[in-house]
Amino acid sequence: MKLLITIDTEADRVWSRTDKVSTENARYLPRFQQLCEKFGFKTTYLVTYRMGQDGFFGDFAKDALSRQGCEIGSHPHPWSSPPDYKLTSDDIKFHPYLIEYPVQIMREKIKAITELLENRFGKKVYSHRAGRWAFNQVYAKILCEFGYKVDCSVTPFVKLNAEKRPVNEPQSPVVDYTDAPQHAYFLNSRDVSKGGELPLLEIPMTTMPYYGKVLSAIYGMIPDGICLYAFRAIFGRPVNWFRPHSYHQEMFRVAMHRLNSGADYIMFMLHSSELMPGANPVFKNKRQIERMYETIEQVFGFLKDNKVKGATCSQYYEIFESQGGGFKK
């Protein structure tokens, strides 16, 4: 099995939805990179336009690339990527999905971030994750136009509900990955939750359902708010992800499931801002950051002990294709 470590490499405090953002969290990436290299694992940094302009990140990433310790991919945040286009009355506040924009604006924004990263690092960009996970078949076709090989936006068992916006604002779509495969597959030109004929490999984020039918039914009837948080505190989250969270046992649970199921990869994800105290809503102080690092190190050690090897997303693509899963014209 391969471990794919994906980092959404983006500005600080994105969740606050303010235009007063910085990219200070780039200074916290070397420690994480060193941890990955300690176990012989590689990272795929999925980079926003703003982080792609950061001088420290540029120097750090070039150094890691020189050791073949990482890959640079793209992670468009459309509200802060050129060209400027006003979709809502305040895109910084509403953070619209890229799939909400006109197709030509989508194409231009993808072109801008791709060219920025390729010019900055002197390498073709092959891997991608959509901002806020929202992806569709139109998006997939545009990525193919720019030579991308891999997407990792699909999150099996997860449904992204429509954003709550005032009635005078454009209403966002529902993005439903509930029935998406848990394994890698070439994308369908009509439905990104199905395999098909596009030359773009989908490597879904590693998730697993945790609730049974009864808990799922109850959970679905609880409105957003304190009651929902209380339910999660007691029973855990309905879908477990292979990512650090306040529920530390989730990562071990998902890792065991993947190993026992005979999966050929497991995908880890983290936001770069989650490495910096106060730059994210989950790990707010140094103590929580240290606890997170302890958990990651334990899980990475567990995977290494079970003969799991590291790979970037592009390297996994090459493995997948070489084993007969490749796109056939």
Image (cartoon, rainbow, N blue to C red):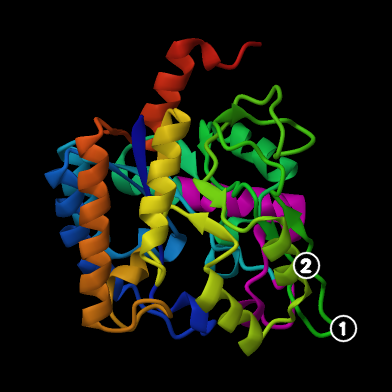
> Which residue is denoted by mark 1 in the rendering?
167
In this picture, is 307 found above or below 172? above
- Segment tinted magenta in the rendering: 86-114
> Which residue is denoted by mark 2 in the rendering?
172
Residue 278 locus on image (x, y percent): 33, 84
In this picture, is 89 found above or below 158? below
Residue 38 locus on image (x, y percent): 12, 46
- Left or right of residue 92, residue 306 in this image: left
Query: Which one is in front, 18 or 232?
Result: 232
Q: Amino acid at mark 2?
A: Ser
Badge 1 density bin: few <14, some 14–19, many ≥20, Cα 10 Å? few
Residue 200 locus on image (x, y percent): 59, 30
In this picture, is 119 found above or below 29? above
Q: Amino acid at mark 1?
A: Val
Badge 2 density bin: few <14, some 14–19, many ≥20, Cα 10 Å? some
Which residue is drawn at the image coordinates 48% and 46% (left, top)? Answer: 114
Residue 97 locus on image (x, y percent): 67, 63
Q: Secondary structure at mark 2?
A: loop
